[in-house]
Image (cartoon, coloured by chain):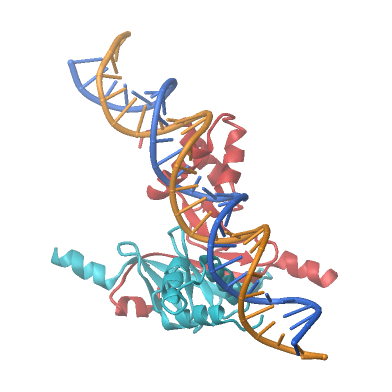
Chain colours: A cyan, B red, C orange, D blue
Amino acid sequence: MRSSRQRDAVLEVLRASYDHPTADMIFERVREEIPNISLGTVYRNLGQLKDEGFITVVESSDTKVHYEGNLTDHIHFLCKKCHNITDVFCESKIPAELSKMGHEVQSQKTVYYGVCKNCRDNIKSN
Amino acid sequence: MRSSRQRDAVLEVLRASYDHPTADMIFERVREEIPNISLGTVYRNLGQLKDEGFITVVESSDTKVHYEGNLTDHIHFLCKKCHNITDVFCESKIPAELSKMGHEVQSQKTVYYGVCKNCRDNIKSN
DNA sequence: TCACTAAGTAGTAACGATTACTATTACTGT
DNA sequence: ACAGTAATAGTAATCGTTACTACTTAGTGA
């Protein structure tokens, strides 16, 4: 993988974003710097950056894939009302059952679902 | 929601399946009983059964959505080699951070990624 | 029992996120 | 400078899923 202005920009945008953007959101943000970048280029670079371990993906309930550049160990909270994804930094250890079953664990993804603080407050005040 | 032969068959197939099938896999299995069922009917019923809480979905890394009829509390292990999804029954408690943040947690999904026992054994013997 | 009505269905068209393709451009080592 | 190869822009194609339409069926109330 050799360096390219487009891929650098995609990674830069993702590292500066804390809202787990989708490919088209990243596309819009990168376009501010490189107006003629193509959506295909964004997708291709997201794929490569993922394969190389520079970014991760968050499978949301909607049809689009969400990306994130924060590789710090954390989990996600997904609000059913506003559909925002919040980062939650907390401990999580691998269950003993998995090694007992003979599986080799390399990574994990945990998502909690519910109603976020903002939405709860709004409901109460209505 | 009133009863229909098609929806009953979809739920029946899913409850009898332990491999987290995709919509087209469920379609094929239901077709053995109802040969002229339409794929759209399968999708519609899967959506309704999900909304009503009779089934759940597993977001895999591939493009297709996986479904399951086993509502028992458990998590999943996804093998990066064979892409099989294994059920893992173990304890998992909600992190204190979430309630501290003011979020109301209703459900959770945890997926571990790695290499399953079968694939590890095959690699060793090669 | 018998319509009535709203939910469900089969079949097909449409949608939309993602991927593939192609001609062109830009790195990089020699 | 140049050859070789990776990357890009723009566009076409793919394919899982959803929407639509005319027709069927289950449940209800007289």
Q: Position of residue B79 (x, y in %)?
A: 65, 66
Residue B106 quadrant: bottom left
Q: Residue furthest left?
A: A126
Quadrant of the image occupied by residue A83? bottom left
Which residue occupies the foreground of this view, B53 or A2?
A: A2
Question: Quick check: can you spot residue A5?
Answer: yes
Residue A107 at x, y = what percent? 58, 76
Camera-nearest residue between D7 and D28 = D7
Give the total number of marks visible in the rendering: 0
Image side of residue A88 versus residue A101, left or right: left
Q: Pick whichever, A90 or A14, lies toward us.
A: A14
Q: At x 30% / y 80%, what residue is drawn?
A: B100
Q: Residue at x 50, y 72 (%)?
A: A37
Residue A115 x, y percent position in the rendering: 30, 66
Kindly indicate the quadrant of the structure image that contains residue A106.
bottom right
Q: Residue furthest right?
A: B126
Q: Is residue A95 visible?
A: no
Q: Nearer the viewer, residue A28 or D27?
A: A28
Seen at 58% across and 44% down, the residue is: B24
In the rendered view, tell whether residue A100 sits above or below residue C18.
below
Quadrant assignment for the C terminus of chain A: bottom left
- Residue B23: x percent and y percent? 55, 46
Q: Residue at x 54, y 82 (%)?
A: A8
Which quarter shows the N terminus of chain A? bottom right
